[in-house]
Image (spheres, rainbow, N blue to C red):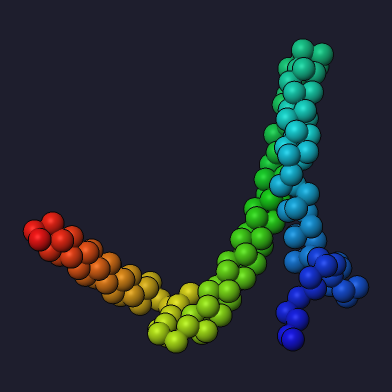
């Protein structure tokens, strides 16, 4: 049987320090309720210390700089996670399309199509949906008139 990835969630030693592996682990930790609670506590502590520091410019600069740096780094982390998840989802859908006898296999590489090509395929599916709805409405009408 073909094993596509480690099922135990552990990367090989060579992959342990790759950006993708670090991003995956960091996203897992930072996406937890504990990380959210820690961020909330940080903001509350910062707000409570406002009167102690007289709401000085430096006091404001601390939170502004901290949140800017975290936001900047999180953009790359989130983008990496989204790209990996989208790629995995596309591969799963491709496998389903490939395995189905009546599926249009040309849809397998749809994510690499231009916007115009995607719009064309979308119009095809809209027309298919409308035909199916009309068919169901006609069948429902025939059943009611009997």
**Residue furthest right in the image:** 13
At x 25% / y 68%, what residue is drawn? 132
Observer-nearest of 134 and 119: 134
* Position in image of residue 40 (x %, y %): 73, 30
Apparent side of residue 119 relative to residue 24 in the rendered image (left or right): left
Above or below: residue 25 compared with residue 44: below
Observer-nearest of 55 and 110: 110
Above or below: residue 127 compared with residue 65: below
At x 71% / y 47%, what residue is drawn? 31
Point out the image quarter for the N terminus.
bottom right
Point out the image quarter for the C terminus.
bottom left
Apparent side of residue 100 relative to residue 71 in the rendered image (left or right): left
Determine which quarter of the picture holds residue 12. Answer: bottom right
At x 76% / y 75%, what residue is drawn? 5
At x 77% / y 17%, what residue is drawn? 48
Above or below: residue 146 compared with residue 99: above
């Amino acid at each position: 049987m073909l094993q596509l990835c480690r099922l135990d969630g552990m990367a090989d030693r060579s992959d342990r320090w790759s950006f993708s592996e670090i991003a995956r682990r960091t996203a897992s930790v930072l996406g937890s309720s504990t990380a959210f609670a820690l961020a909330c506590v940080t903001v509350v502590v910062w707000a409570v210390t406002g009167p102690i520091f007289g709401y000085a410019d430096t006091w404001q600069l601390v939170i502004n700089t901290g949140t800017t740096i975290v936001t900047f780094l999180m953009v790359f982390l989130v983008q990496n996670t989204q790209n990996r998840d989208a790629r995995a989802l596309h591969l799963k859908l491709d496998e389903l399309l490939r395995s189905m006898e009546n599926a249009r296999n040309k849809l397998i590489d749809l994510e690499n199509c231009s916007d115009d090509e995607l719009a064309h395929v979308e119009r095809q599916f809209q027309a298919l949906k409308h035909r199916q709805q009309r068919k169901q409405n006609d069948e429902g009408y025939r059943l009611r008139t009997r």
